[in-house]
Image: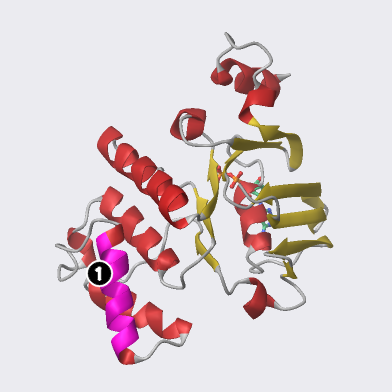
Amino acid sequence: MKNENVIKTVNITKRVKRKVLLEDISLNVEAGSICGFLGPNGAGKTTLMRVMMGLVKPSQGSVFLNGVDVNGNRPEALKHVGAMIESPLFYDYLTGRIMLLNLSRLHGYTKEEREEKVEEVLQIVGLEKRGEDKIHTYSLGMKQRLGIAQALLGDPSLILLDEPANGLDPIGMRELRELIISLNQEKGITFFISSHLLDELQHICNHYILIREGRILYQGQVDDLMKDKEMRLEDLFVEMMTS
Ligand SMILES: Nc1ncnc2c1ncn2[C@@H]1O[C@H](COP(=O)(O)OP(=O)(O)OP(=O)(O)O)[C@@H](O)[C@H]1O
């Protein structure tokens, strides 16, 4: 695993009126890791991911993606970053393939390259046989995989996923996990994945960041977190979240 940080936030604070949504968040995510971003509902996960993508400006602090300041040079910072933040907004009446072809225009490919790229990402997420079907006929799991397909269009080195397992059944969940692991292992893509449910991430992450009420409670490797090998990660998570 390389050592550089693909995500680095420095003292991020976000206030809206008098409310503090994020407070002094400094975190690092190393290249090649699968980082679980865990916290209860309302902890500030979506807000931080929106700040990371430059969709929301922080009140203070900086975010660097692949070493580039998101608020200094957003296009350059996001060049190799894919994201699925909140439930992806799909145009249900389009086919999966057409939607991806439309979105692929954002990446400056030629027409032939766009067609090739869309075939490639449909294949990666296992939707190649459903590309001609309208999105409203897709299951929730297929929609999530379509969201990952759009995140893959720009050949990202980093993908941010906000609650990607929301509402998935066990099969959809397993397919999602396998997809993330294979993209990480075969393409070296770093993942930053939020969830309020530890179970969803427990088997795939090698790095965790825990957040509560806009503040970081813990960040580090899984092994460091598990002081006692017998202790279940879930017990530790509950202990940290409630103490
Ligand atoms: N624009 C805003 N103005 C005021 N409050 C906001 C705004 N955006 C978010 N919040 C509040 O900030 C807190 C954090 O919200 P956020 O959506 O980031 O949490 P989350 O960890 O992603 O939660 P969930 O798991 O429920 O999606 C919540 O209390 C939310 O109501």
Left or right of 71: which side holds 112? left
Q: Is residue 165 above or below residue 101?
A: above
**Amino acid tagged 1:** Gly
Left or right of 178: which side holds 142? left
Q: Residue at x 46, y 73 (%)?
A: 154
The residue to which callout 1 is attached is 96
Q: Residue at x 33, y 75 (%)?
A: 117
**Seen from this angle, which residue lies furthest top?**
230
Q: Residue at x 44, y 57 (%)?
A: 187
- Is 117 contained in the magenta span? yes
**Seen from this angle, which residue lies furthest front?**
1
Whether residue 167 appears in this view of the structure is no
Helix, strand or loop at mark 1: helix
Left or right of 241: which side holds 152? left
Q: Is residue 123 above or below residue 118?
A: above
Q: Nearest the camera: 171 or 135?
A: 171
Q: Is residue 153 above or below residue 2?
A: below
Left or right of 165: which side holds 52? right
Dot 1 alpha-carbon crowd within 10 angstroms: few under 14, some 14 to 19, many 20 or more: many
Please state the extent of the stretch shown in magenta in the rendering.
112-123
Q: Position of residue 4 (x, y in %)?
A: 71, 55
Whether residue 227 appears in this view of the structure is yes
- Is 45 contained in the magenta span? no
